[in-house]
Image (spheres, grey):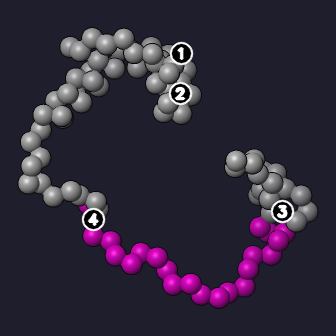
Amino acid sequence: MIQAKINIDYLAKLANLALTPKEKEQLKTDMPHILRFIEIVKHIKTQGVAPTFQTISIQNVSQKDRRRASLPRRKALANAAKKNSKYFISRPVF
């Protein structure tokens, strides 16, 4: 088993995960197994294997743009968590 000192809080922050104390304890237990699995995968011989970008053959899944009547503002805003009379209100992106 791989022994490594891992800062679970730092790892969760890097992964943008909000972990409960119970989840953190479970991750501490699971981490050596995860690292061991990664070590095994590193040694798999993949020379000559073509990269896989898509596992199923889907082509042209987008619909063509077409003109149609828009949703009335009242209906569009009906289920919005935050709104004023004309717009959705969201948190700043930047």
Query: Closer to us: mark 2 or mark 3?
Result: 2
Please name the residue that numbered disc 4 is placed on. 56
Q: Which residues, given as a range, are shown in magenta?
A: 55-76
Q: Residue at 49%, 80% (x, y): give it.
A: 63
Name the residue located 12 percent from the left edge and 34 percent from the top edge.
Answer: 43
Asked which secondary structure carries label 1, the reply is helix
Cα–Cα span, label 2 and label 4:
34 Å
Residue at numbered disc 3:
87
Dot 2 amino acid type: Lys
Q: Nearer the viewer, residue 27 or 51?
A: 51
Q: Which residue is mark 1?
A: 21
The disc placed on residue 13 is 2
Alpha-carbon span between mark 3 and mark 4: 39 Å
Residue 51: horizontal and vertical position, in percent? 21, 56
Nearer to us in this view, 16 or 88: 16
Which one is closest to the eye, mark 2 or mark 4? 2
Label 3 is placed on what type of residue?
Answer: Tyr
Mark with earlier residue (2, 4): 2
Q: Which numbered disc flags the more N-terminal residue, 3 or 1? A: 1
Q: Main secondary structure of the magenta part?
A: loop
Mark 2 or mark 3: whose residue is earlier in sequence: 2
Does the image show residue 26? no
